């Protein structure tokens, strides 16, 4: 099982927690200014026999231009969604997009403003881009009921358009991580099933 995390020079703590929780792989995300090849060397020195890893970039509107020049083939690329970042989906430049639900729009009377719609969902399916759901977003949300409702709507939309889904802790501190079983149970209550997890974990 895999988890996606966002470390801040605390990789060793994440490795210890991931091993304790029973993960087999960790995906470390970094700002594009970070030398991830060096990070891979540093992390490999502390990995145990039961844990593998990959490193990737987390991009946003400000760093995307620089990042996309630097990114090599097969490097994991993750972004958080906002309107200017939609071109990354259209141009197949990311692997996973998180945070659709955090878009700052009020829900309408009959439908939640979940950030994802059928047009974007179809583009993601056609371009092989996964829709990510962050447990960290839930932990730190001020209006958890709104966020959870939007996630449920987006999970239904992803299933309708056959968009791959990625549920991850996106933890910035090891204590924000949860076991794979807890993650599956939690997001299962929001509408995911085991086959959804098999596409990305």
Image: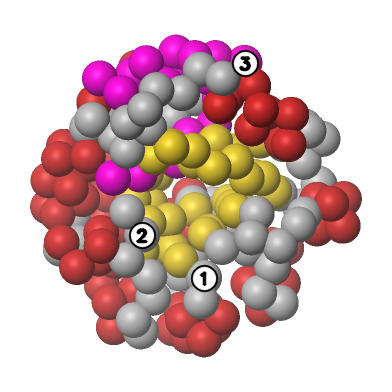
Against 179, is 71 above or below? below
Left or right of 166? Residue 66 is right
Q: CA distance from mark 1 to mark 3?
A: 28 Å
Q: How many numbered markers are drawn?
A: 3
Nearer to the camera, 95 or 137: 95
Return the disc, 2 or 1, that comes first in the chain's sequence: 1
Q: Residues within 10 Å of mark 3 (few under 14, many from 20)?
A: few
Residue 199's x, y, as percent?
A: 32, 66
Local SS, label 2: loop
Residue at label 2? 200
Local SS, label 1: loop
Q: CA distance from mark 2 to mark 1?
A: 11 Å
Q: Which residues are magenta?
A: 1-20
Q: Residues within 10 Å of mark 1 (few under 14, many from 20)?
A: many
Decide if residue 130 is in sight here.
yes
According to the image, what is the colour scheme of the structure?
secondary structure
- Image point 64% across, 60% down: which residue? 74
Residue 159's x, y, as percent?
A: 27, 77
Residue at label 1? 129
Residue at label 3? 9
Q: Is residue 32 magenta?
A: no
Decide if residue 186 is in sight here.
no
Q: Is residue 18 magenta?
A: yes
Q: Residues within 10 Å of mark 2 (few under 14, many from 20)?
A: some
Quick one: quadrant of the N terminus? top left
Residue 136's x, y, as percent?
A: 39, 34
Left or right of 169? Residue 8 is right
Against 57, is 36 above or below? above
């Amino acid at each position: 099982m895999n988890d996606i995390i966002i470390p801040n020079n605390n990789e060793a703590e994440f490795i210890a927690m991931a091993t304790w929780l029973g993960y087999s792989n960790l995906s470390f995300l970094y700002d594009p200014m970070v030398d991830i090849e060096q990070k891979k060397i540093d992390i490999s020195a502390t990995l145990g026999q039961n844990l593998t890893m990959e490193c990737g970039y987390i991009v946003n509107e400000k760093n995307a231009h620089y990042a996309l020049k630097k990114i090599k083939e097969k490097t994991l690329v993750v972004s958080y969604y906002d309107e200017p970042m939609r071109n990354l989906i259209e141009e197949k430049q990311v692997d996973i997009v998180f945070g659709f639900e955090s878009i700052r729009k009020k829900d309408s009377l009959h439908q939640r403003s979940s950030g994802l719609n059928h047009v974007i969902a179809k583009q993601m399916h056609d371009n092989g881009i996964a829709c990510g759901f962050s447990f960290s977003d839930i932990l730190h949300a001020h209006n958890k009921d709104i966020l959870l409702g939007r996630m449920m709507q987006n999970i239904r939309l992803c299933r309708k358009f056959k968009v791959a889904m990625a549920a991850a802790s996106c933890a910035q501190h090891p204590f924000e991580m949860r076991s794979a079983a807890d993650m599956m149970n939690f997001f299962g209550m929001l509408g995911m099933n085991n086959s959804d997890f098999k596409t990305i974990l």
